[in-house]
Amino acid sequence: MKKIFSFFAAILFAGSMMADTYSVTIDQNAGGSNNVHITTTTANSSQDVSYENVSWVAEWTGEGVPTSGSKIQCQFGTGSKLCSTVQFSTSDINGDITSVKVTTWGAKSTGAKCSVKVGATDFKKGVETSVSLSNTVSEEHEFTGSASGAIVIAWEQTTAKAIYVSKIEVTYTPDPNAVAKPVFDPEETSFEDNLNVKLTCATTGATIYYTLDETEPSASSTPYTDAGIDIDKTTTIKAIAIKGEGKSPIATNTYTPQEKLTCAQFSALSNSTTINHLLNEVVVTFVDGEGKNIWVKDASGALLLYYRDGNYGLKVGDVVNKLKGTKTTYQTKVAEMVPTRTISELSVVSGEAPAPEVMANAPTVDDINKYVVFKGISVEGEFVSGTASNITINVAGTDVTFRSNFKNAYTFVAGKKYDIVGIVSYYNSAIQVNFVSATESTPTAIDNTEAGVKATKVLRDGVLLIEKNGVLYNAQGAVVR
């Protein structure tokens, strides 16, 4: 019985296997509708493509091409960028191969040539071992012969012209002793904390053997069991299926734990709309009234979680793991994570509300998103309930805008001092503090000593004390006798 393997390409490489036909659609646009996408933007590169247990390697020498448009072919090189060689290869089709049909063409006046080799045998189109490409779109070239082994389809040219590929079809008589290559589950190679990998083989009665040290597996390697393979670090699994004298091609997958970022590392990322970044353990410091703006911190810094769909469900003091999201920036400086997981997908443990970080000086861009308190601040003015307004407050000699973004009310009385809690932010090219709350500062014994009396620092037994009017006070304001 004969089987057909077909590969359709748009701009890259892909596959889909059914009964007697293996069909692959290819484009070079990650968001395209085809099965597999080969990114040809990088010069002198290669890409592995695997679908339905058949793996191909695409390699090219020379300049890559832009990823754009909606073309349904795989393109290498342009009229200004030379791609001198291209090669597609696979060792996963077992049996007597008798035909390799390639749908390929080039730009006008191309001098590119295409050839096919199976094992050590050159396949021919008529009497020729290579064909010159024309600029006829979707032109088919059939190479015939009789051989088994690796299939290598190669293109070469010396002028800067585009080479296009849109279909590969292989006709072969299966090897009766062929054993299917093991399949990994999951195929996705990125994981979070730990992973259990399962292996299967479509050949009934075959035994799977595997290695974890990157050596080639054999019948003397570890036999696979239904318990699967547990991994918690970067691990390469190589597996082979054996039945009698038959051996499958070796299947290889490298699993890598996804990096858990700190708040500072996440904040330093470039903005992205597609990449899900994993955040390390964080603590919730403040939540706005709607629950959609949540500030979190870890030892490295602070971050704003912005949940566009409303109340995210986190509360102050929650210790959160498994946060994933995309990086955005507000007003060029405020780093945000837009969560891509629901709260049910997170690991959340209730905890104590963290105290705000005491700020002795005016905040800087390094303090953005921090939950802070300014102590002993003299200020006069009023925040009106339900209205966002500004008050300029002098912090350690620097004027800082405090804004009632959360529309909470407070009246500051002249002559009094306050401990003011807020979130450091950035707006209109300047640092801004989003007002959270305020309380009157508690005066210390030192504050209550006679006004105008000179205070002197005294070091006694290694402890710094303050002397006023003949009385010694410690740093907390208590009288020392």
Image (spheres, helix red, strand yellow):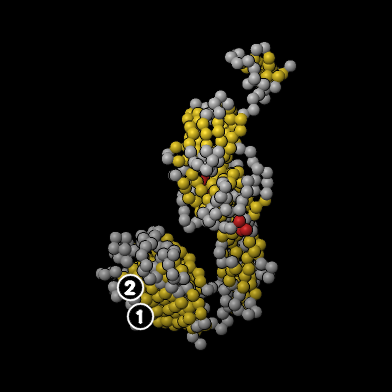
Relative depth, front residue between 171 and 68: 68
Would you identify the image quadrant in which residue 408 lies? top right
Q: Is residue 324 above or below residue 216?
A: above
Instruction: Tally the marks.
Output: 2
User: Residue 292: x percent and y percent?
Assistant: 55, 51
User: Residue 189: x percent and y percent?
Assistant: 56, 62
Outermost top residue: 470
User: Residue 306: x percent and y percent?
Assistant: 53, 50
Q: Earlier in the sequence, mark 1 or mark 2?
A: 2
Query: Which amino acid type is marked by label 1?
Result: Lys
In the image, 425: left or right of 455? left
Name the residue located 48 percent from the left edge and 68 percent from the top edge.
Answer: 49
> Can you say which quadrant of the picture contains the C terminus?
top right
* Residue at the disc numbered 1: 125
Name the residue located 44 percent from the left edge and 70 percent from the top edge.
Answer: 34
* Residue at the disc numbered 2: 105
Of the numbered discs in the image, which one, if any, rests on residue 392? none
* Mark 1 and mark 2: Cα distance apart in space: 15 Å
In the image, 463: left or right of 18? right
Instruction: Assess disc 1: are there few (<14), some (14-19) or many (≥20) residues with their C-alpha within 10 Å of its C-alpha.
Output: some
Dot 2: element = strand
Q: Is residue 415 above or below residue 330?
A: above
Query: Which amino acid type is marked by label 2?
Result: Trp
